[in-house]
Image: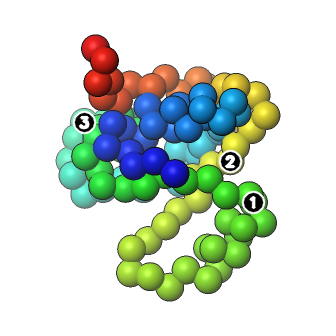
């Protein structure tokens, strides 16, 4: 689990790198905040802007299904993709195209 204050794309890459796995996320399933919707590129903002005060976490597919079914809290949760055995972090668009997801969020070391 990680907060995505540096941007979803960057923090997902950090989780995957630390766990030695990859991920594929579905563009259509990414929650887009009201603030991000105001930008020229709402999906880009949702992927790369920070300070969203959201958490990103992974679960097994079985546990994810159980959590989504049981979740009754006022703060919504969303399944945005899945962990893969490759070391690539990718995004799948609505038309089925898959491409690398470059970490373009905030980098504290730059």
Which is more N-terminal, label 1 or label 2?
Answer: 1
- Left or right relative to 25: residue 47: left
Mark 3 → mark 1, Cα distance in angstroms: 34 Å
Please identify the quadrant where the C terminus is shown.
top left
The residue carrying pointer 1 sits among few (fewer than 14), some (14 to 19) or many (20 or more) residues within 10 Å by Cα, namely few
Mark 2 → mark 1, Cα distance in angstroms: 8 Å
Mark 2 → mark 3, Cα distance in angstroms: 27 Å
Report which quarter residue 97 is drawn in.
top right
Residue at point 61% right, 83% down? 70
**Labels 2 and 1 touching (C-beta < 8 A):** yes
Residue 108 vs 16, above or below: the answer is above
Report which quarter residue 15 is drawn in.
top right
Residue 27 place in picture, x, y as percent = 53, 44
The residue carrying pointer 2 sits among few (fewer than 14), some (14 to 19) or many (20 or more) residues within 10 Å by Cα, namely some
- Left or right relative to 38: residue 100: right
The answer to whether residue 40 is seen in the rendering is: yes
The residue singled out by tag 2 in the image is: 82
Residue 55 vs 106, above or below: the answer is below
Which is more N-terminal, label 1 or label 3?
Answer: 3
Between tags 3 and 1, which lies in front?
1
Q: Nearer the viewer, residue 72 or 17?
A: 17
The residue singled out by tag 3 in the image is: 40
Residue 1 vs 48, above or below: the answer is below
The residue singled out by tag 1 in the image is: 61
**Labels 2 and 3 touching (C-beta < 8 A):** no
């Amino acid at each position: 689990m990680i907060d995505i204050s540096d941007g979803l794309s960057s923090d997902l890459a950090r989780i995957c790198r630390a766990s030695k796995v990859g991920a594929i996320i579905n563009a259509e399933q990414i929650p887009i905040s009201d603030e991000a919707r105001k930008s020229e590129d709402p999906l880009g903002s949702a992927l790369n802007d920070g300070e969203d005060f959201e958490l990103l976490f992974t679960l097994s597919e079985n546990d994810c299904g159980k959590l989504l079914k049981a979740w009754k809290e006022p703060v919504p949760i969303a399944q945005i993709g899945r962990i893969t055995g490759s070391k690539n972090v990718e995004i799948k668009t609505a038309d089925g195209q898959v491409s690398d997801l470059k970490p373009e969020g905030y980098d504290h070391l730059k």
